[in-house]
Image (cartoon, grey):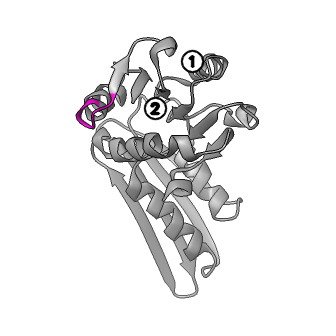
Amino acid sequence: MRVLLNGRNGKVGSVLGPGLEAARHQLVDSLGDAEAMVDFTTPSAVTGNVRAAIEAGVPCVVGTTGWDAEEFHDASVPVFYAPNFAIGAVLMMRFAAEAARHLERAEIVELHHPAKLDAPSGTAKLTAERMGGEIPIHSVRLPGLNAHQQVILGGAGQTLTIRHDASSREAYTPGVLLALERLSTLPPGLTIGLDALL
């Protein structure tokens, strides 16, 4: 597939680009040459990038967080957005949603590198939403961290901790490849969350 990778020189893009090429995708430099657009840029850039792709009739896979994806609910092409493309993070969200049905309280602690622009993270927000909404989220931004999240649930006489750690941005490549593989099967408009593809 011919893919326009926005954010190709960024922290995720610099790892994702070689991963896409290793999976036999061809990276192109313009929407006119693209069969799909992948965006890992910034909240200020992503909306314009998605609009341009829709106008060009190019379906999108978006991993940028901190923007309002709902604007593209009725897009004329598939717009797939996931706040986290790590398969383990998606499973963590599933397990947390199940556990929340059985334990009375929960809190989320998400820890990231200091350059992460949004707090709380998109993953933490989506986890809280899947768990029923009103879950307190604590955000930590420190040097030495990459991307980590734990959900701590408590009940009478017990706690349960569900944790995911992405030690390298290579963790996101398999999820992006899965999204590209399934993109043609998605309906026009917005689809949120990698769990929709698992």
Number of callouts = 2
What crowding class fits label 2: few (fewer than 14 Cα within 10 Å), some (14-19), or many (20 or more)? some
For the residue pair 10 and 197, the one nearer the viewer reads as 197
Whether residue 121 is visible: no
Tell me the kind of residue under disc 2.
Answer: Lys
Q: Provide the residue span drawn in magenta.
A: 21-25
Q: Circle 1 sits on which residue?
A: 45
Q: Which residue is drawn at 47% across and 29% down?
A: 38
Q: Which of the 4 quarters of the picture holds residue 73?
A: top right
Tell me the kind of residue under disc 1.
Answer: Ala
Magenta part mainly helix, strand or loop? loop
Q: Circle 2 sits on which residue?
A: 116
Residue 23 on image: x %, y %: 27, 38
Q: Residue at x 52, y 88 (%)?
A: 157
The residue lying furthest to the bottom in this view is: 157
Residue 52 on image: x %, y %: 62, 16
Q: In this view, does 169 lie to the left or right of 38?
A: left
- The residue tagged with tag 1: helix, strand or loop? helix
Say above or below: 90 vs 50: below
Whether residue 34 is visible: yes
Say above or below: 28 vs 180: above
Say above or below: 5 vs 94: above
Q: In this view, does 19 lie to the left or right of 148?
A: left
In space, the residues marked 1 and 2 are separated at their CA atoms by 15 Å
